[in-house]
Amino acid sequence: MSSSFSLKAVLRRLLLRAFPVLRSLASAFFSPKYLRGRYFEEHVSGWKWVWRSVWTQKVLGFSRDVPWPVSPFIAISDPRNITFDPDDLNNFQTFGCYFQNFDAHIDIGKGTWIAPNVGVITANHDVNDPSRHLPGQNVVIGRECWIGMNAVILPGVTLGDHTVVGAGAVVTKSFPNGYCVIGGVPARLIRQIDCVNSGGKYR
């Protein structure tokens, strides 16, 4: 048990020391700006995602045009229209998330957590003619938000910092002030969050 643990620790240290070389090799497949941050410099999870994604993205063709490692079970309409911090690369390694952004931008604030099966939509179908889409509207998700499983965020929504979206919620309007819990269909304010125990920061 202890020898196995020690071997894992040694391998982890070797991987972290080899970071510049590994980053150079992985840059043949993914943009270097995404091959940094905590999952590469402090943990080894990033390298697991890279080597898995070389196979699933570049060989098998799932999300081939996405310049960062993603799960084969995630859909991103246009990777050029999404902004996030590399420290949050974990949000693209889960199942069932759908980032529909072919006609507008999605901005995800640093420290935000997105559960499986979340949909972030920037353009709806026209109710009078479902064969066409309405013009896209940007979606902005603030810093340190938490989007629960099966939630859907619709076009034009802005969520302020530290907004918690309950599982299964459909967010049809903005909550720009943040520091709140929202939930339901359509999502409504459930309660305010007065303080944030995150690195000693308080509202």
Image: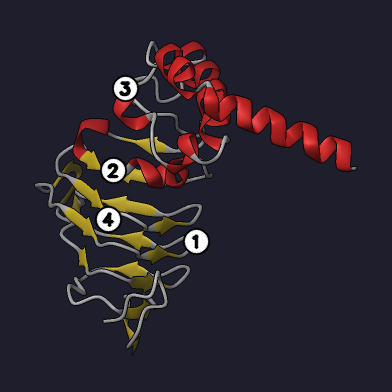
| Among the two numbered marks 3 and 4 on one chain, the one whose residue lies closer to the N terminus | 3
The foreground one among 103 and 145 is 145
Name the quadrant of the C terminus: bottom left
| Eye-nearest disc, 1 or 3 | 3
Q: CA distance from mark 1 to mark 3?
A: 29 Å
Residue that badge 3 annotates? 31
90 relative to 178, above or below:
above
Where does residue 100 sit, x and y in percent of width and height? Answer: 28, 43
**Tag 3–tag 2 contact (CB < 8 Å):** no
Residue that badge 1 annotates? 149
Where does residue 181 sit, x and y in percent of width and height? Answer: 37, 80
Residue that badge 2 annotates? 100
The foreground one among 57 and 24 is 24
Identity of the residue drawn at 25% across and 62% down: 142
Determine whether, in the image, residue 9 is placed left or right of residue 165.
Answer: right
| Among the two numbered marks 2 and 4 on one chain, the one whose residue lies closer to the N terminus | 2
